[in-house]
Image (spheres, rainbow, N blue to C red):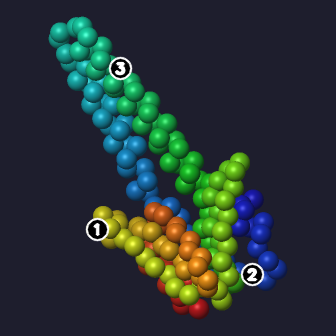
Amino acid sequence: MSYVSRILQPGEQRLHTGRIHWVVYLPPLVVCLAGLVLWIVALNREAPGLLTTTSFVLAALCGIGGLIWLAWAWFDTWITEIEITDRRVIYKRGFIFRRTSEMNMDKIESVDVDQSILGRILNYGTITIRGTGESQEPFKTVADPLEFRNRITAR
């Protein structure tokens, strides 16, 4: 059972489920691809020696490091929950050490969306929810941030 499902109040309804965008997988995939290219280059070298050994070591480091990074990106995506209900916005991150943030809808003053050029092309961005007082809650790499913002401000 998800965290959000456990904490919903009686009568509280889910309006929108946010998610982390798939773009978080690109950097580790690039590192894995670099490891694969280094491995192929090292296999095709005719001169054995230090250079070939170094190429194999670099290829292995890139491959293993990229796979670990990829697994971490998947795990981080899996343990993150972003939910908009009719009463509040809920953000939960973490597995053993959990960080949660909840903001009541009536306490939200504004919702800011920051998107880079790549973010606009691929439809992801950072959403910052500003509440009464000085509270700010940034949600990074959220998929479809304009729809997320619209679900909050449409109330």
Q: Secondary structure at mark 1?
A: helix
User: Label 2 near label 3: C-beta < 8 Å?
Assistant: no
Q: Position of residue 5 (x, y in %)?
A: 74, 67
Q: Earlier in the sequence, mark 2 or mark 1?
A: 2
Pick the residue in front: 15 or 114: 114
Corner quadrant of residue 63: top left
Numbered-mark total: 3
Residue 117's disc number: 1
Q: Quadrant of the C terminus?
A: bottom right
The alpha-carbon separation of the residues under discs 2 and 1 comes to: 36 Å
Q: Secondary structure at mark 2?
A: loop
Residue 87's disc number: none
Closer mark to the observer between disc 2 and disc 1? 1
Q: Earlier in the sequence, mark 3 or mark 2?
A: 2
Q: Quadrant of the N terminus?
A: bottom right
Closer mark to the observer between disc 3 and disc 2? 3
Q: Secondary structure at mark 3?
A: helix
User: Label 1 near label 3: C-beta < 8 Å?
Assistant: no
Judge whether 151 appears above or below 140 on screen.
below
Judge whether 73 appears above or below 101 on screen.
above
Q: Residues within 10 Å of mark 2 (few under 14, many from 20)?
A: few
Mark 2 = which residue?
12
Q: Residues within 10 Å of mark 1 (few under 14, many from 20)?
A: few
The alpha-carbon separation of the residues under discs 3 and 2 comes to: 55 Å
Q: Is residue 93 visible?
A: yes
Q: Residue at x 43, y 54 (%)?
A: 24
Mark 3 = which residue?
57
